[in-house]
Every structure is written in C-alpha cells, then in structure tokens.
C-alpha cells in the first residue's frame, strides 16, 4: 500500500510538473533582457500547455500566415512575446553567437507589392546588389547602390535586356542568371522586339553585356529555370520548376520539374535530381561536398484555374522539405547521391537559399528566414512580418543580410558569427 502511494505521488508530481513546464517556454535571452526584438525558445517549445491552437492552411488560412509565432497559447504568459520578436533563438549557444550583441532589422525600401523579388546578387566591385522583379511587363532589373551614406535604388538594364530573372549567383566576377520567360517583349531601351526563351544567362555586371549559355534541353524548351548554384569546377546546377507558367511569363510546361547540371565548358546538360515535386532553392556547402535543394510542392498546379494568377493552389500536404545530397566527383561532372530530408519548413516552404561561410543553411520561408545547421537543426529564425522570397549576404565582409519580398526590402545588420561566401 505504501508503495502504491509513492507511485501515485510520483505521478501527481509529474502531472504537476508538466502543467508548469511551459511557464517559461519563451524567455528574454541572456544580454537581451531589455530588447523585445530578441527572444529564446526553451526546448524548442516541445511541450506547450493545453489548450494551444495554430491556424492551418488546410482550414483556409493563407499558408504564409500558418506560423509558429502566431500559435495561440492561452495559458502561457511568455509565449505572447513572440508576436513582437524579430530574432527567435532556438539554439542558445549558436544562435547568440550568430546574432552578436546588437542585431537589427530595418525596412530600407518599399517596393511594388504585386510582384515577387528574386535573384539578388552582391557585386563587391560595385558594392551593389542587383536583383530582379519577375513579373509581367517588367523588362529590366534593379540595382541597390551601397556606396553612399544611404542606399539608393535604380533601374538596371542589360544588353540585351533579360525578362523574368528568378535566380542568380556570382562566380569569378560574372553573374549567372536563371531566367523564366519565353515570350517576346519590347526593349525598355528602344522598344525593339526581344526574343527570349527560359534558360541560363551570363552577365558582366560592369559592362552589362549578357550572353546566352543554355536555352533548351535537346530541342525542348526548359520550363522556367528557378535558382542555381555553381561548383568549384564552374558547373552550374539549376532547378527547373513551373513558376514561370504560374506568373504567365512562359508557356505551359513540357518537362517534368527537375534539377540539372550544366557544363558551360562543353555545353552538356544532365539531370541530377528528379524526385522533388517542385525543386526550388539550391545551396552548396563551403567544402563542396554537400548540396541542398528545397521542394516547394506545397504549390499545387493540378486543377489550378488558368485565368487566375498565380496559377496554382496550395496543398497543405505538398512538398515543403529541404533535402541534402552528397556531391560525388565524376569526370563529366559531379553527381548527387544519398538524398536525405533535413528540414521540414515550419512556415510555408523554403524558396531562396544560401549557405554561409560557416556552413549554416539559410532559407527564405514565408515571412522570415530560417537559419539551420548543416544537419538541419533550427538555430534561429528571423521574423520579418512580410513575405520573403529571397535574400543575399552583402557588405565587405558579407555580414549584412538583405531580404527581398513583395512590398519591401529589409536589411539585417549587426550580425557577428555568420558571413556569406565570397563567390556566391
């Protein structure tokens, strides 16, 4: 009987402990006690006090508003802090090392809110960021000049003009673009007709001259190249998803969504990954041994109405996972093996991706940036409060983050333990 009483007391104590364990789910981080922009989440919020409710896209909520920080936890006085938090830290040691002592988010520019903003590339020789607005009727890019006291933004027209750039990377002083558009369009310079197909393009950012590198797969038009990365051999890996059709800058797709390797030195193009629903962002580790590819199959093209843009609906159970692959050497070009999921986006799905010099994997998902370890551990999240499509490291030491989304361009400064790669 005594033993039974002890067991009952232990169970009661455990229940009591569980009922109180979430009293400090969210706390002010060390050294940020008076800064409401930074908060630490204990134990990844693995236990929340009941009742708690998170709105879900399957119940009609906009998927980008289906977020962790908007979860309602009625009996937890600490959780409401996340609603006013910009930097949400999940891994205390690594997260605070990345943030440094004075991280700051500021909205620098307002932009048109009916267009995504993609392909930002920082050019150190210009101390400027070149980015694109892939949207109907927008036939030139933009450039952010960082040389003055305050950044300025202006149009950037290439020769010839390029329509609907979606992904970009810097490699040995040149910019390499993945462009989605296949329709003819008027030159913004003189009105002459420009013929273009989806493909891979090379830009000299100093002369603004553009050269076509790839515009077909054995006579078939590519769907709409979305993002790209370049390995140490100069080979270009690019995702070819269906988003050009979604925004009506190209025809209905004729190829399965896939990821390709293109060798500019020979012209050869080969499929390296074909299992993702809609391959999107790409990144490669600093040692070149691991490639990351995000799947945004949460956007569903089956049965989407043709007359409504974008031409997809949302499938709550569609792909929203980031995968890692081993990069293997072969004489005709490296290939990918050992596909493995490392991150299931906690908000929407990962669009643009970058890998830092330290090996952190960053992804634009919903209205913020996920910062992951190379193994997919969520270290921290930067909550912006507005949709983010893409982002770019910038500055002399690549310690600033510039975030791009419909309606705004933001800058994150003051970071310490994270840097963008020099050629990327």
Image: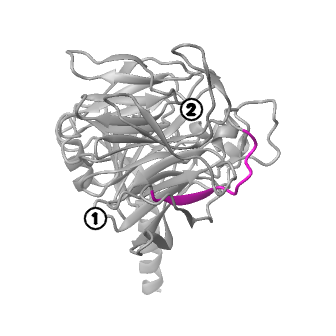
- Tag nearer the camera, 1 or 2: 2
Q: CA distance from mark 1 to mark 2?
A: 31 Å
Q: Is residue 231 above or below residue 349?
A: below
Q: Which residue is label 2 attached to?
A: 164
Mark 1, Cα crowd under 10 Å, few <14 / some 14-19 / many 20+, is few
In the figure, residue 275 lies in which quadrant?
bottom right
**Secondary-structure class at tag 1:** loop
The reply to whether residue 211 is in sight is yes
* Relative depth, front residue between 78 and 265: 265
**Residue pictured at 40% horizontal, 35% vertical:** 120
Q: Position of residue 98 (x, y in %)?
A: 23, 47
As drawn, the label of residue 287 is 1
Q: Position of residue 262 (x, y in %)?
A: 49, 58
Q: Position of residue 104 (x, y in %)?
A: 27, 30
Q: Which residues are magenta?
A: 251-263
Mark 2, Cα crowd under 10 Å, few <14 / some 14-19 / many 20+, is many
Q: Is residue 121 above or below residue 273?
A: above
């Amino acid at each position: 009987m005594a033993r039974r009483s002890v067991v009952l007391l232990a169970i009661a104590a455990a229940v009591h402990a569980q009922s109180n364990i979430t009293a400090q789910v969210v706390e002010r981080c060390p050294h940020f006690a008076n800064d409401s922009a930074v908060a630490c989440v204990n134990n990844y919020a693995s236990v929340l006090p009941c009742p708690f409710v998170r709105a879900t896209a399957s119940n009609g909520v906009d998927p980008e508003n289906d977020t962790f920080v908007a979860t309602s936890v009625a009996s937890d006085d600490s959780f409401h802090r996340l609603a006013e938090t910009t930097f949400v830290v999940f891994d205390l040691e690594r997260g605070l090392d990345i943030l440094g002592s004075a991280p700051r988010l500021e909205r620098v520019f307002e932009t048109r809110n009916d267009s995504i903003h993609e392909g930002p590339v920082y050019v150190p020789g210009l101390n400027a960021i070149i980015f694109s607005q892939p949207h109907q009727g927008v036939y030139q890019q933009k450039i952010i000049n960082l040389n003055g006291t305050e950044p300025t933004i202006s149009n950037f027209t290439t020769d010839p003009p390029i329509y609907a750039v979606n992904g970009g990377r810097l490699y040995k002083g040149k910019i390499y673009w993945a462009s989605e558009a296949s329709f003819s369009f008027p030159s913004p310079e003189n009105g002459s007709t420009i013929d273009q197909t989806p493909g891979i393009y090379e830009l000299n950012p100093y002369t603004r001259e553009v050269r076509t590198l790839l515009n077909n797969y054995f006579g078939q038009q590519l769907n709409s190249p979305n993002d790209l990365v370049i390995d140490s051999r100069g080979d270009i890996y690019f995702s070819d998803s269906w988003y050009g059709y979604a925004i009506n800058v190209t025809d209905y797709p004729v190829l399965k969504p896939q990821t390709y390797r293109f060798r500019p030195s020979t012209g050869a193009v080969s499929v390296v990954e074909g299992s993702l629903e809609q391959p999107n962002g790409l990144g490669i580790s600093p040692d070149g041994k691991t490639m990351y590819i995000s799947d945004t199959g949460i956007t569903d093209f089956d049965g989407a109405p043709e007359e409504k843009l974008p031409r997809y609906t949302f499938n709550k159970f569609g792909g929203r996972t980031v995968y890692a692959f081993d990069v293997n050497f072969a004489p005709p070009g490296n290939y990918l093996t050992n596909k493995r999921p490392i991150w299931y986006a906690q908000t929407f799905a990962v669009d643009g991706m970058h890998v830092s010099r330290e090996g952190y994997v960053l992804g634009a998902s919903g209205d913020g940036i996920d910062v992951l370890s190379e193994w997919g551990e969520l270290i921290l999240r930067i909550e912006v409060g507005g949709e983010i499509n893409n982002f770019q490291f910038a500055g002399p030491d690549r310690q600033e983050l510039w975030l791009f989304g419909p309606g705004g361009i933001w800058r994150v400064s003051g970071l310490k333990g994270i840097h963008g790669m020099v050629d990327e």
